[in-house]
């Protein structure tokens, strides 16, 4: 599959081209930059505007085969000379965000609160490429680089940015400069950002949920807004590892039986392409409860975990089944925690409400609600 280039690479390339045109007075239709991955990027330069005091131009985002919402959008850079700048020996490059680039409003992100959401690696790339041009033309002043994405505010509504506390536009991101197709890494990076924010805000318990399924149950039963939890999608094991790395000592996992039943079998990536043995695991719990062959056949023929809960209830084995299921979930979660983090769990169903919880789950939730 074809790789693409990040918004950070686009911003660096546009900035280098704008700086070149500003300092040389000549139009530049192509530019080449180095990405942190060691791959050259040579985009076309478009939407060129050359004025007396500044140059603005754009690079069109190329995401390759990755289904990136920013694919095809323009990333602009406007470069201007800073009058009465700092010492000529520093050759300072000041970087700011313009229209369509978000601004950070919560701690725990790559940039401090108040800064434009242009991450550290893209900032380094922009500064390095622009300084190359400054050296080329022996320019001894300071330059202001303003990055903008005209449709960034609308695009941001389709991203995690509003949830992360980035307002007004998209982020200029990328650690390698390269977009890998169908990147799992991007989602894991987002989970880590949310965990880091929770830590920066002083939260003692990392509350984790695969998604918002069961939102109403958690609000009604525990007065907890599940939307405030860190969304781990299918990556339960990776999320535990990241929570440990960030120094959390307590974690509470809240989720629907359809996802979390898999954890009772030690499955830490709950995507169906990785493993789908929900009925088998629920049948195993029934065996532990002394279920007959008829019950097991009904369970294995079921099409959903909700249907299996109904079967449990019909045969009067729901309580013993979920005691066993929660025991296994507790075992595997804390095995992954490896003694570095204590993990509690709440399992529910939209139709049937609370199905099971580990011994310390409500205590952890109480801490999280403070």
Image (cartoon, grey):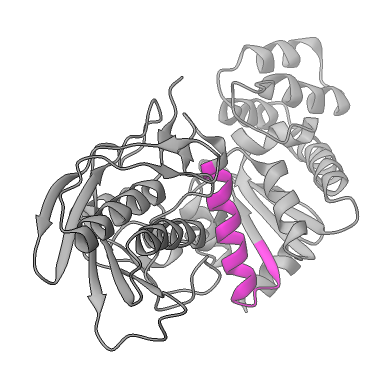
- In the rendered image, which quarter contains the C terminus? bottom right
Q: Nearer the viewer, residue 335 or 185?
A: 185
Give the image location of residue 369, x and y in percent: 61, 74
State the residue at coordinates (33%, 85%). 85
State the residue at coordinates (32%, 54%). 16
State the residue at coordinates (49%, 75%). 112
Residue found farthest to the front: 138
Q: Is residue 159 among the parts visible in the rendering?
A: no
* Residue 7 higher or lower than 106, as above or below: above
Q: Is residue 39 among the parts visible in the rendering?
A: yes
Residue 161 found in image quarter:
bottom left
Give the image location of residue 216, x and y in percent: 46, 55
Q: Nearer the viewer, residue 153 or 11?
A: 11
Q: Nearer the viewer, residue 300 or 366?
A: 366
Which residues are drawn in magenta? Answer: 186-206
Residue 187 in magenta stretch: yes
* Residue 357 higher or lower than 164, as above or below: above
* Residue 129 higher or lower than 223, as above or below: above
In the picture, measured across the screen, residue 18 lies left or right of residue 40, that is left
Residue 14 in magenta stretch: no
In the picture, measured across the screen, residue 204 lies left or right of residue 94, that is right
In the picture, measured across the screen, residue 352 lies left or right of residue 6, that is right
Give the image location of residue 218, x and y in percent: 54, 58
Q: Nearer the viewer, residue 155 or 41?
A: 41
Q: How many marks?
A: 0
* Residue 103 higher or lower than 126, as above or below: below
State the residue at coordinates (89%, 50%). 338
Residue 31 found in image quarter:
top left
In the picture, measured across the screen, residue 263 lies left or right of residue 220, that is right
Residue found farthest to the bottom: 84
Give the image location of residue 175, x and y in percent: 53, 49
Q: Please, what is the dominant secondary structure of the magenta stretch?
A: helix
């Amino acid at each position: 599959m074809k790789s693409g280039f990040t918004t950070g690479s686009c911003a660096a390339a546009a900035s280098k081209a704008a700086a070149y045109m500003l300092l040389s007075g000549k139009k530049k239709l192509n530019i080449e930059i180095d990405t942190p991955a060691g791959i050259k990027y040579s985009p076309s330069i478009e939407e060129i505007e050359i004025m007396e005091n500044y140059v603005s131009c754009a690079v069109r985002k190329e995401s390759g085969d990755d289904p990136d919402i920013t694919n095809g959008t323009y990333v602009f850079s406007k470069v201007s000379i800073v009058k009465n700048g700092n010492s000529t020996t520093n050759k300072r490059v000041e970087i700011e965000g313009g229209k369509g680039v978000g601004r950070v409003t919560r701690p725990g992100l790559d940039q401090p609160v108040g800064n434009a959401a242009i991450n550290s690696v893209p900032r380094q790339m922009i500064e390095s490429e622009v300084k190359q041009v400054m050296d080329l033309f022996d320019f001894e002043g300071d330059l202001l680089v303003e990055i903008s994405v005209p449709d960034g505010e609308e695009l941001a509504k389709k991203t995690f940015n509003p949830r992360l506390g980035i307002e007004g536009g998209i982020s200029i991101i990328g650690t390698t400069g390269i977009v890998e197709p169908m990147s799992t890494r991007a989602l894991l990076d987002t989970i880590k950002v949310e965990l880091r924010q929770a830590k920066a805000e002083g939260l003692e318990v990392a509350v984790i949920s695969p998604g918002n399924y069961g939102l109403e149950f958690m609000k009604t039963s525990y007065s907890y807004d599940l939307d405030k939890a860190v969304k781990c999608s299918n990556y339960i094991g990776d999320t535990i590892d990241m929570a440990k790395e960030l120094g959390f000592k307590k974690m509470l996992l809240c989720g629907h039986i359809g996802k979390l039943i898999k954890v009772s079998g030690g499955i830490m990536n709950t995507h169906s392409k990785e493993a789908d043995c929900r009925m088998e695991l629920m049948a195993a719990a029934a065996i532990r409860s002394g279920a007959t062959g008829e019950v097991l056949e009904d369970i294995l023929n079921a099409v959903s975990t909700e249907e299996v809960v109904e079967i449990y209830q019909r045969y009067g084995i729901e309580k013993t089944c979920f005691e066993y299921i929660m025991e296994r979930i507790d075992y595997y979660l804390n095995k992954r925690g490896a003694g570095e983090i204590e993990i509690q769990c709440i399992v529910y169903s939209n139709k049937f409400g609370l199905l099971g919880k580990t011994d310390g789950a409500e205590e952890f939730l109480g801490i999280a609600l403070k």
